């Protein structure tokens, strides 16, 4: 296994603007180390790290201090963290009096098992009417979905917010959170991994009672086409055949 640096830079007055830049190929990631050091920002800040618009790490900084944490990484996060464009949302503002320096290093080896399919990256659920929708265009999912969410602004004391995930109109997951998942300096905010196998077209995430900002990320993970079992490839072929038949019938 080898180590590679995904992020090593200062963040100042980046606000809610997502920073995007090239990143190294780290292989299938087994371990992640995140370190942030305040350069004068006295406020707790939300930080989200992604690759290819699929979130891999989320945490809240301490107040005007530092945080270093190392975690073992499991699938499907280890595959999503392996390579591609890097995205960082680091909500530091000039009004806070300074910024932060952040490093993120990964230890990995081998090829990723899964491919990530982005749906939402650091999106404000409340401003979208507490409902987010993604069209996966009848993609066969041999894996599942990964979600993460954090309450902010007036939700930082919220309790019992209820979330539901629908695929093709069918509810496949729901959870009520006892808190707002915002804990400064306490390390990673754990993602929610939801197993799913089948064809996915419309995917919808709903909060039934959120009262203000919840920052949400969500993505699907599936095995590359060449790694799918024969029965799955046969199902995909049958679906394509039906779609082609519909098109032909429509034209004639």
Image (cartoon, rainbow, N blue to C red):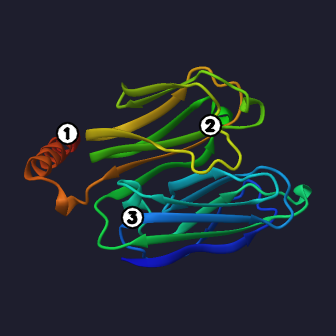
* Residue in front for this viewpoint, 238 or 217: 217
Q: Position of residue 121 (x, y in %)?
A: 56, 51
Q: Which residue is mark 1?
A: 246
- According to the image, label 3 marks what residue? 30
Name the quadrant of the C terminus: top left
**Depicted 128 relative to depicted 42: above or below:** above
Marks 1,2: beta carbons within 8 A: no
The numbered disc on residue 69 is none
Q: In x, y percent, where is residue 33?
A: 54, 65
| First-in-chain label (2 vs 3) | 3
Position of residue 221 relative to residue 135, above or below, is below
Q: What is the secondary structure assignment of the residue under circle 2?
A: loop
Residue under pointer 2: 181
Tags 3 and 1 in contact by the CB under 8 Å rule?
Answer: no
SS for callout 1: helix
| Distance of label 1 from label 2 (alpha carbons) | 46 Å
Report the Cα–Cα distance between label 3 and label 1.
Answer: 45 Å
C-alpha span from label 2 to label 3 = 25 Å
Closer mark to the observer between disc 3 and disc 1: 3
Quadrant position of the N terminus in the picture = bottom left
User: First in sequence: mark 3 or mark 1?
Assistant: 3
């Amino acid at each position: 296994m080898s180590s590679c640096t995904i992020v090593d830079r200062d963040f100042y007055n980046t606000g809610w603007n997502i920073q995007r830049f090239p990143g190294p190929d780290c292989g299938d990631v087994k371990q992640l180390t995140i370190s942030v050091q305040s350069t004068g920002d006295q406020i707790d800040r939300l930080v989200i790290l992604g690759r290819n618009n699929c979130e891999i790490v989320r945490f809240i900084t301490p107040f005007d201090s530092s945080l270093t944490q190392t975690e073992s990484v499991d699938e499907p996060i280890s595959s999503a963290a392996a390579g591609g464009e890097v995205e960082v949302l680091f909500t530091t503002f000039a009004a806070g009096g300074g910024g932060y320096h952040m490093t993120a290093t990964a230890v990995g080896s081998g090829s990723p098992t899964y491919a990530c399919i982005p749906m939402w990256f650091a999106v404000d659920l409340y401003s979208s009417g507490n409902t987010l929708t993604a069209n996966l265009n009848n993609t066969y999912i041999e894996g599942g979905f990964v979600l993460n969410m954090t309450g902010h602004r007036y939700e930082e004391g919220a309790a019992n917010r209820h979330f539901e995930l629908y695929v093709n109109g069918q509810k496949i997951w729901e959870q009520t959170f006892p808190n707002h998942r915002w804990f400064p300096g306490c390390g990673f905010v754990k993602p929610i991994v939801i197993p799913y196998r089948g064809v996915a077209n419309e995917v919808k995430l709903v909060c039934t009672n959120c009262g203000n900002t919840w920052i949400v990320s969500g993505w699907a993970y599936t095995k590359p086409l060449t790694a799918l079992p024969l029965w799955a490839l046969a199902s995909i072929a049958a679906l394509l055949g039906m779609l082609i038949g519909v098109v032909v019938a429509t034209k004639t």
